[in-house]
Every structure is written in structure tokens, then in C-alpha cells.
Amino acid sequence: MPQYNPYYPASYQPITQPTQNQNSITWVSGEVGAKSYIANPNTSVLLMDSEADVFYIKTTDASGMPLPLRVFDYKERIEQPKPNVDMNAYVTKEEFEKALAELKEVSHAEPIIPTIATSEHGEYAEPNKPI
């Protein structure tokens, strides 16, 4: 008959660490609480400040050493009412197309700015006269 050894467990049961719930929010008390929060190695953790509109991202390297704490401010986004716009300050599509047609017509006309020509020796000549 086998003897029972009270110092040897009957079956091996691994001890597991409790895991952090990924859907929960982790609250800390101020920046001191965020800095003292212990995070697992090679992880980044979002920490919400319970005292101010601030959140922190704490990141650790492979050895568990914390990297510089990243601090962010946040505020609630409230939809602003749209201001009343004076539509008289804008042109209609028809007015715009009319102005565009006039501009195209003017741009195809002869240039009104006379050009000043110079001779080979650098002397100025009258416009539209041979040098």
C-alpha cells in the first residue's frame, strides 16, 4: 500500500495571478497615484484621475521599469449652436458663372500692359517699334 506524504501535494495545481479586466476603468488619486500604480512588464495602462479631468498612460519596459508617465487633459465636447449666417454676403451660382464668363472674356483680350523692349546694347525702345 502506498504511503501518504503530507508534504507532497497530491496533484499539481498552478498558482495563477489575477488578471486585470480589460473592460474596467482603473481610477487613481492624482499624479502620485498614477506614478505609484504597479503595471505588468511590457504593458501600457490607461489610468483615470478621480480628482481632476486628467488621464495618464503608464508604460513599462520588459524588465517592469516604468517609462515617463504621459499626462493628458480632457474635457467634454458640447455641441455648439450654429451661428446665423448672413447669406447676402455670398453670390448665387448664376452670379458666379456670369462673373467667371466675364473674366474669361477679359483674359482672352489683348494685353493692356505695354512691354518695354531693349536693344542689344541695353537701350530702351518705344513699344511696338522695331529695335
Image (cartoon, rainbow, N blue to C red):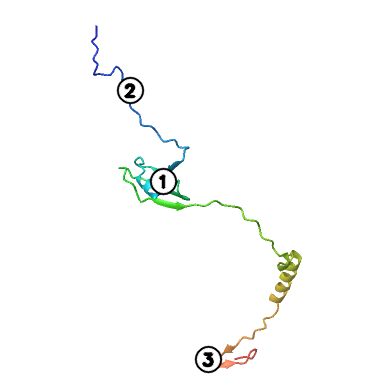
Q: Quadrant of residue 42?
A: top left
**Pointer 2 with pointer 1, Cβ within 8 A:** no
Give the vertical position of 21 relative to 86 (above or below).
Answer: above
Residue lying at 41% horizontally and 36% vertically, measured from the top left: 20
The quadrant of the rendering that contains the N terminus is top left
Looking at the rendered image, the disc whose residue lies closer to the viewer, 3 or 2, is 2
Q: Residues within 10 Å of mark 3 (few under 14, many from 20)?
A: few
Q: For the residues labelled 1 and 3, say whether their Cβ atoms are less than 8 Å apart.
A: no
Q: Can you name the residue that lies furthest to the top here?
A: 1
Above or below 83: residue 68: above
SS for dot 2 = loop
What distance separates the C-alpha of mark 3 from that of mark 2? 101 Å
Give the label, 1 or 3, closer to the camera. Answer: 1
Disc 1 target residue:
29
> To which quarter of the image does residue 63 belong?
top left
Taking the spot 33% from the left edge, 23% from the top edge, the residue there is 13
Three-letter code for the amino acid on which mark 2 is drawn: Gln
Question: Is 7 located above or below residue 93 in the figure?
Answer: above
Q: Dot 1: few (<14), some (14–19), or many (≥20) neighbours within 10 Å?
A: few
Q: Which residue is mark 2?
A: 13
Marking on residue 122? 3
Counting residues from the start of the chain, the first of labels 3 and 2 encountered is: 2
Going from N to C along the chain, the mark reached first, 1 or 3, is: 1
Q: Amino acid at mark 3?
A: Gly
